[in-house]
Image: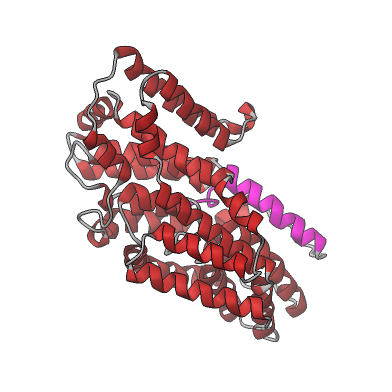
């Protein structure tokens, strides 16, 4: 183990401790750790700069600004009136409806971040007039966006299956891998996650935001009345951005550009003033994302991720038990994804899993399913996926609260996934 590996691990542990203590703002902690990683040679200064200007950071900031603009229009009140009419004023029914919308979108889109960016303002529109705090609803909503991604054989599942199929061909497996393998290995978990989100999550989420919700505070500070044109323009712009997200392949523009253009149009059309747009920027959350992204890059650059992968591959070598093999390739990606982006973990551990299966003569299909499931079950820290910092801003959560809300579902999914996949896709 090199000096840079040791420094990376120590800084990660220090960052996590600071998050849990909560004395410093999350962004300050993450930014300081990013600075130290560069200072000690674990990564390059350009890593921080690329994080600040990354597509995910821009998408997070712009979607929160767009949601702030939408909240100033007539749309939330109109949507709420429609939901009340359909549901008879029943919050639980409306809440379930938004969860199902999230399930449908995360099955069609390739990015949980894009899905959550679309649905979190809708959930806000359900919560606010029915006097339910956003902190009760935003975390279970992001869990549905993540944990149900790549289950149904649609957009995201097809894309990721093609990547795994290429790996299997490269490593000489006779079997292929397609989206139906994801569906076969994961379909029951749609019902488990939705049931958890509906019945259990409202009991374990905080009744009040733990930290201030930026968009909500800025709206309280300024109740400026919009002109009819600005009112309608804000709604049309937001819906247009969402439709472009959904039909992104046909539009041919990256999602960050679409969100950025939407913000510019809202300011031009008067839905937001320049100062309102600036106030809505979630600076702390963006710095948190940049720090987490720098840590993830340092783990790869320093060889720490590869080192951990080699340890795991060696540890399961010679094991001919499906449950032990499958548990290793669910639990380890789940743990690693707490401080690396989930897509990166999938790309690192899927080849390791397939090489291990090849050496053991095992059926390889279950391991990539579990690598994906484990990576998408990680929502305890903001490093796991870009959707988590956005959720923390939308729901008013800190890292300690994220852990408290996450641990129970993580254990349930770990046990159920390993047991179920070992039955339907046994390695031996």
**Of 274 and 261, the residue lying toward us:** 274
Residue that appears at 20% across and 45% down: 132
Residue 375: name its quadrant: bottom right
Residue 110: % across, % down: 57, 44
Q: Residue furthest front?
A: 39
What is the quadrant of the C terminus in the image? bottom right
* Quadrant of image for the N terminus: bottom right
- Judging depth in this view, the residue of 16 and 203 nearest the camera is 16
Give how far across and how far down residue 397 sits, in percent: 32, 57
- Residue at the image point whose x is 70% and y is 57% from the top: 164
Residue 153, given in percent of the width and then of the height, sits at 58, 47
The answer to which of 32 and 337 lies nearer the viewer is 32
Image coords of residue 239 (percent x, y): 43, 26
Residue interval drawn in magenta? 144-170
How is the structure coloured here?
secondary structure
Q: In this orientation, does residue 326 appear?
A: no
Q: Is residue 16 above or below residue 185?
A: below
Locate residue 174 relative to residue 199 in the image: left or right.
right
* Residue drawn at the location 56% of the way across and 58% of the way down: 293
Query: Residue 149 in magenta?
Result: yes
Position of 286 compared to 330: left or right?
A: left
Instruction: Name the foreground residue: 93 vs 63.
Output: 63
Magenta stretch holds residue 271: no
- Residue 270 lies in what quarter of the image? top left
Magenta span dominant secondary structure: helix
Q: Is residue 215 visible?
A: yes
């Amino acid at each position: 183990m090199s000096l840079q590996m040791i420094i990376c691990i120590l800084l990660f542990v220090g960052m996590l401790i600071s998050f849990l203590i909560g004395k410093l703002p999350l962004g300050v902690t993450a930014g300081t750790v990013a600075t130290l990683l560069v200072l000690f040679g674990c990564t390059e200064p350009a890593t921080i700069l690329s994080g600040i200007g990354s597509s995910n950071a821009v998408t997070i900031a712009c979607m929160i600004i767009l949601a702030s603009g939408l909240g100033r229009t007539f749309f939330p009140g109109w949507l709420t009136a429609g939901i009340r009419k359909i549901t008879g004023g029943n919050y639980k029914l409306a809440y379930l409806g938004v969860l199902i919308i999230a399930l449908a979108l995360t099955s069609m889109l390739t990015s949980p971040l894009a899905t959550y960016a679309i649905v979190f303002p809708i959930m806000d529109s359900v919560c606010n007039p029915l006097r339910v705090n956003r902190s009760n609803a935003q975390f279970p909503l992001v869990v549905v966006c993540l944990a149900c991604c790549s289950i149904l054989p649609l957009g995201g599942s097809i894309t990721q299956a093609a990547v795994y199929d290429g790996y299997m061909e490269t490593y000489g497996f006779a079997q292929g891998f397609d989206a139906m393998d994801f569906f076969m290995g994961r379909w029951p978990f749609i019902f488990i996650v939705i049931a958890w989100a509906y019945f259990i999550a409202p009991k374990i989420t905080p009744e009040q935001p733990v930290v201030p919700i930026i968009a909500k505070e800025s709206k309280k500070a300024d109740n400026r009345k919009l002109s009819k044109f600005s009112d309608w323009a804000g709604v049309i712009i937001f819906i247009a951005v969402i439709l472009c997200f959904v039909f992104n392949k046909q539009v041919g523009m990256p999602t960050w550009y679409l969100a950025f253009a939407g913000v510019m149009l809202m300011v031009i059309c008067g839905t937001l003033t320049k100062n309102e747009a600036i106030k809505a920027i979630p600076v702390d959350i963006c710095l948190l994302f940049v720090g987490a992204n720098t840590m993830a890059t340092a783990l790869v650059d320093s060889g720490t991720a590869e080192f951990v992968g080699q340890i795991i591959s060696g540890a399961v070598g010679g094991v001919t038990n499906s449950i032990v093999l499958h548990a290793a390739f669910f639990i380890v990606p789940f743990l690693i994804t707490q401080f690396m982006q989930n897509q990166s973990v999938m790309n690192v551990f899927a080849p390791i899993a397939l090489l291990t299966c090849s050496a053991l003569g095992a059926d390889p299909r279950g391991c990539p399913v579990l690598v994906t499931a484990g990576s998408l079950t990680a929502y305890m820290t903001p490093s796991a996926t870009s959707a988590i910092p956005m959720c923390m801003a939308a729901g008013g959560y800190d890292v300690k609260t994220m852990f408290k809300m996450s641990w129970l579902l993580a254990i349930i999914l770990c046990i159920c996934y390993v047991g179920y996949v070992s039955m339907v896709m046994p390695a031996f």
